[in-house]
Amino acid sequence: MLEELAILGVDKYPGSSVERGVPYQDIPGAKIQGHRNNTRLRANRVAELVDLKGKAVLDLGCNVGTMAARFFELGASAVTGVDYDPASIAVANRLNPGPRYCVQEITLEFIQRLPHYNVIVWVSQFMWLAKQRGMEYALDCLWEIGRHCDTLVFETAAKDDGSAP
């Protein structure tokens, strides 16, 4: 796993809060601390708000798959995690069996081709997309994501450092 962790953050977007060799999400049981160290608690909070049992869930921007794996543990019938970073997806595949993971940049064109999901979780991504492609593009993506699910769980970082409540 150390090889995968070493290349995390190498392929990052300008302005990203991701640091080289440090996952954005924490990895339960790993000695390395992620940029966000409360990932399982955040996933539990989602499950308090939305019944995941038996649902098809899409985790957009899944990073190393910690939240996606927790959704699966909490009873989601099918979980798909998507992230643009191949190193993050390699870690997710190695550490978090159950969900299906794929490398994919989250673009409007990709979102428009999504099938329908019961739940789509899109957290800590919106601000970065707005910085990279503009607010109108980010809002178009948000609107389109909402068209492909019954329930959208959405959160955006509050500051440029990626922090959020």
Image: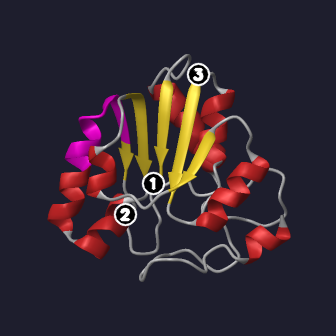
Q: Which residue is drawn at 41% across and 47% down?
A: 122
Query: Is residue 62 shown in magenta?
Result: no
Q: Residues within 10 Å of mark 2 (few under 14, many from 20)?
A: few
For marks 1 and 3, give the one nearer the viewer. Answer: 3
Q: What stretch is highlighted in magenta?
A: 142-153
Does residue 51 appear to the left or right of 6 in the view shown? left
Secondary-structure class at tag 2: loop
Front-most of residues 164 and 118: 118
Tell me which label, 1 or 3, sits earlier in the chain. Answer: 3
Which quadrant is the C terminus positioned in?
bottom left
Disc 2 to disc 1, how far (Cα)? 8 Å
Q: Could you tell me how far apart the alpha carbons at marks 2 and 3 are, in whole angstroms?
A: 32 Å
Q: Is residue 114 left or right of residue 65?
A: left
**Image location (x, y in percent) of residue 30:** 83, 58
Quickly name the residue at label 1.
Answer: 165
Which residue, given by chain and number where applicable, does mark 2 sit on? 158
Crowdedness of circle 3 by 10 Å Cα count: few (<14), some, many (20+)? Answer: some
Residue 106 appears anywhere in the view: yes
Q: Image height check: is 17 above or below 68?
A: below
The three-letter amino acid code for the residue at tag 1 is: Pro
User: Which residue is most to the top?
Assistant: 54
- Kindly identify the amino acid type of the residue bearing the numbered disc 2: Ala
Element class at badge 3: loop
Q: Can residue 35 be seen in this view?
A: no
Determine contact: label 2, label 1, CB under 8 Å.
yes
Q: For residue 110, which numbered disc appears in the image? A: none
Image position, residue 156 (x, y; %):
37, 56
